Amino acid sequence: MTGRPRRPRTASAPARILSGPAGGALAVILALLQPARAADPPEVAQPCLACHGGTLAEGAPPVAGHSNNYIQLQLVFFRSGRRQNEIMQGMAAGLSDNDIRALGRYFSSLPVPDTPPPPDAQPDLTRAGEGAAARLRCAACHGDAYQGVQAAPRIARLPEAYIAKALGDYRATRRPSSGGAAMTEVAGTLSDAEIGALAHYLAVLP
Ligand code: HEC
Ligand code: HEC
């Protein structure tokens, strides 16, 4: 019988100690001594951070700081295909209900990103958007500072192109709306010009 060549011993000193007889107990003690970090991403959230982490991928909105309920609902909508987006439908297809709960818990536990507003190169468009938002009473559901209330999410300072796309998607019913179909109703009558102005106004809010 020819023995297989022994594996080269590349393990570091601590790894050798931890794999020794007392290692199990030592590993447990070391784990207990780690400071608790509430915001450690669960494994299922790792692939998400490539697009929704500190730097947002093109077209991807921030997810951090939305309510647990809102995040879970959107993932369920993507998984069922009722909210249409090629990337996110692919990402959500394999998620279990437990994965969705863990993702909602994790992303809602993160602080709202405190990115400064982009410089406003079109103040006239901002004023038009402000007027449209007042006339259409967007703040009645989203809150005076558009930071979100109950089912209505934070919409202040999301990327301009994302807001415009979201409103267009609601209008075209490519995206369902929670909250008694609130957004399907609201967006149904918006013109392209109103969508452009609203998106700009909300994106540059101080
Ligand atoms: C390759 C980039 C990419 C990856 C990876 C990705 N996303 Fe997304 N995500 C997007 C884009 C783009 C959108 C916008 C979809 C749209 O326009 O409707 C989005 C939208 C979302 C939304 C809706 C946000 C809102 O404000 O309504 C949630 C929630 C979300 N993603 C969660 C996740 C989670 C959880 C993961 C990991 C399982 C993930 N995403 C992985 C690109 C990505
Ligand atoms: C009757 C309540 C109500 C009113 C009025 C309302 N919204 Fe909403 N809005 C909601 C709810 C609820 C959602 C979450 C819908 C979902 O599940 O996708 C939402 C979602 C959104 C989103 C998607 C955010 C994201 O991260 O994808 C945008 C953008 C938005 N609203 C903009 C507006 C604008 C602009 C107005 C005014 C023209 C407005 N809303 C008026 C209730 C409302």
Image: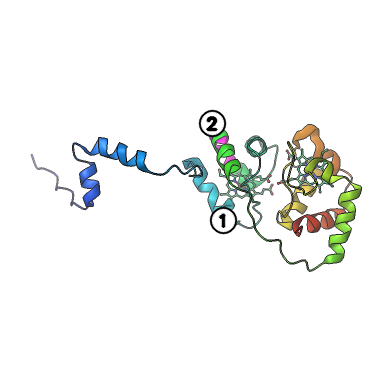
Nearest the camera: 121 or 47? 121
The first of marks 1 and 2 along the sequence is: 1
The residue that appears at 72% across and 43% down in the rendered structure is: 153
Q: Residue 31 appears in which quarter of the rendering?
A: top left
Q: Nearer the viewer, mark 1 or mark 2?
A: 1
Q: Please tell me whether mark 2 sits on a helix, a strand or a loop.
A: helix
Residue 94 part of the magenta-drawn span: yes
Residue type indicated by callout 1: Gly
Q: Position of residue 155 (x, y in %)?
A: 74, 49
Residue ranking furthest to the bottom = 121
For label 1, the residue is 54
Q: Distance from label 1 to label 2 (Cα)?
A: 25 Å
What's the magenta bit mostly, secondary-structure-wise?
helix
Residue 185 in sight in this render: yes
Q: Residue 78 appears in which quarter of the rendering?
A: top right
The residue that appears at 82% across and 45% down in the rendered structure is: 139
Colour scheme shown: rainbow
Q: Residues within 10 Å of mark 2 (few under 14, many from 20)?
A: few
The quadrant of the picture occupied by the C terminus is: bottom right
Q: Position of residue 65 (x, y in %)?
A: 63, 45
For label 2, the residue is 98
- Please, is residue 197 above or below residue 147 in the view? below
Residue type indicated by callout 2: Asn
The residue that appears at 84% across and 45% down in the rendered structure is: 138
Residue ranking furthest to the right = 135
Nearest the camera: 56 or 3? 56
Q: Please tell me whether mark 1 sits on a helix, a strand or a loop.
A: loop
Point out the stretch of residues depicted in magenta: 91-100
